[in-house]
Image: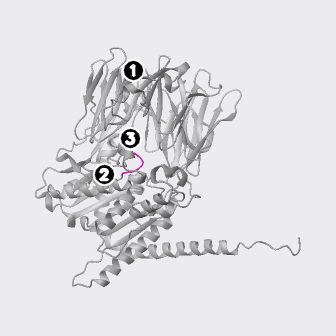
Amino acid sequence: QEGTKVPSKRKQNTSIVTSDLLHKNLLKSEQKNWNNISPTYKAMTKRIKGKLEELHNMYTLNSGSPRMRFGENVYFEENGCIFLAKADDGEGNAEILFSVEDLGFSDAFIQRVRISPDRRYMAISLKSENSEEATCVIIKLGDLPVVEKVIPSVFSFEWAANDVLYYTTQKNLKCQKVFMTTFTYQKHTKLVYTEQDARFFVDLYCTKDRRFLTINSNSKTTSEVWLVDCRHPFESPALVQARTTGVIYHVEHRKDQLYILTTYGEPAEYKAILTDNYLMKAPVASSGKENWQLVYALEKKTKLVDFEMFSDDCIMFLKNAGHLYLNVISFVSHSVQSIKLPTWACEFELESHPEYTTSTCYFQLSSPVHPPKRFAYSFKENNLIEQAVQEVPIITNCHTTRLLAKSKDETLVPITVFHNKNSKELHRRPLLVHVYGAYGIDLNMSFKEEKLMLIEEGWILAYCHVRGGGEQGLSWHRDGCQHKKLQGLHDLRACIMLLHRVGFSQPKHTALAAASAGGVLAGALCNTDPALIRAMVLQAPFVDVLNTMMKTHLPLTIEEQEEWGNPLEDEKCMKYIKSYCPYQNIKPQCYPSVFITAYENDERIPLTGILQYVQKLRKAALDHASRTSKKGNWIPNIILDVQANGSHCDSSWEHSLNE
């Protein structure tokens, strides 16, 4: 009505406009700085690019992607094409079913493939570099494959029956809804499950015998599983065990029993076993935790990396102090067989074996400097078989060393070191140290061409498995998150000091590399112990923990509270985050040189925080230099490269090569 006063929104809008303007100006200034400085590296870039392409052609192209076996059919993906080969026929005669370009997605790559039980349909997810969301395309296979349906913003999907697909949708980095869709007579789609708690993320999985489809709702510390009976895919899902704070569990099925991998070990008889993980079993009909019976308990400080169920056995892929090994549990003889894997192995990827009754398990082993190599474990012969693939030269001149550093509280922290066997005077060699230490996730140790190139050029590579990561089980993560985050920093400092003490390089030849949440520990060390390193390389780093955790409108803040704490409601937590947050603790001192890659469209790490971090760090370094104007005073290079394309730490080969 006329004369009614309109409440003023001007103040609030002014602050938004001002911060937008500040962001744009900072971005422009950094882009200008990058354009001025990048030509300096032109010759070096050209040499490195040529070398990496050569290594990529030699190793990665030859190693091939994991295979999916269905009876006599073998499906695999290469260069954006899906191939079908006959198991006995060899892959030379494989036929192309279709390519990503045929589907009209020229800049996308295939992320996930699922084939319906009767092999009439194939569901694939396609993802472009500039988004975290994938598109699911369902193709009807036949003489001429036909696109049956396209579903946007899908995270995970599984076939419950021949023409019944369950899928989860992703919105603002969250997955909270499960849908079911059918393809034959009565085509329809319906909502099956909705997660109400913002801390929980939903994904789907099929048990190995394809008897159940599981709906898994997980937060960082707690989980809940619902079962869809694949023989009756239209019936409502049944709950296995209601969520209980601190209890994580995952379900497999065999002969009317659920096999449950869990952190739950409350009953008195398990107290003597100091471990994080148990394999339990319970009848499908009464699956509550009061009916869980112990089958096997993992050793202390052991990380369960993967788990595969077969009709008479199950295989556990385990990691202890950086070493990988297998445990084979026989349900027939009730025995446990432990199988060592090659000492260089740091990562493995299980190949898809839809046959539950198969007598062989196939997987690939790799390390940062060893391309994926195919192995098989035979249940019948009870042995490990190395699969001969194309003749790729084997890296024989690389030495793998494993060390234990004593942290501030006497905890022993594993380090994996790679160096060229022919390198003399290791204390003079450049050293690249890697760290992550968050979310209970292991440091990424998959094969990368650039790591092999560095080894060939005489570098030493070190991987510090600090607390906060998952390398030694769930307690390893718990001891490095929330109010124990500083323990990860103490671990990193102890690792670098030990490397120097035993003769691997020295501070003036040492660089530190981290990505995403690894930026917290790397950035913190840069503030507390800048003299330990000469350079730091960060990719999409999380460097402004305090301000980010105060912004509840950001998509991940609520669920991240289980990792960092809630500074909005807990003053102690706010003070604690402030004590280590990289951005909050910058001060005038002699910093190492810093190179940061960030992404303009990153949904996980706000670019504003990185821009402000770089500005503040540069100012502190210059302040220090002007105060101590000694002759030959060293001013570090602090460089930010903001990529217009790419999403959070997730690049195609071409994009990562340019980076």
Calculate the distance from the C-alpha at mark 2 to the C-alpha at mark 1. 34 Å
Where is residue 346? Give x, y as percent. Answer: 29, 42
Report which quarter residue 75 is drawn in: top left
As drawn, the label of residue 248 is: none
Residue at 30%, 26% in the rendered image: 377
Look at the image and give the residue range highlighted in magenta.
437-441
Q: Which mark is residue 449?
A: 2
Pointer 2 or 3: first along the chain: 2
Residue type at the position of mark 1? Thr
Q: CA distance from mark 1 to mark 3?
A: 31 Å
Which residue ends up furthest to the left in the rendered image?
424
Residue type indicated by callout 2:
Glu
The disc, 2 or 1, on the residue closer to the chain's N-terminal end is 1
- In primary-sequence order, the first of circles 1 and 3 is 1
Residue 303 pos. (x, y %): 34, 38
Could you tell me which secondary element the residue under label 2 belongs to? helix
Query: Can you tell which of label 1 and label 3 is closer to the viewer?
Result: 3
Question: Which residue occupies the foreground of this view, 46 or 286?
Answer: 286
Image quadrant where one finds the C terminus: bottom left
Q: Is residue 343 magenta?
A: no
Instruction: Kindly report the secondary structure that dominates the magenta region of the rendered protein.
Output: loop
- Return the residue found at the far right: 2
> Residue at position x 57%, y 41% from top?
136
Q: Residues within 10 Å of mark 2 (few under 14, many from 20)?
A: many
Q: Which mark is residue 474?
A: 3
Q: Residue at x 56, y 58 (%)?
A: 554
Which label lies toward us, 2 or 3? 3
Quadrant of the rendering where the N terminus is positioned: bottom right
Of residue 433 and residue 118, the one placed in the foreground of this image is 433
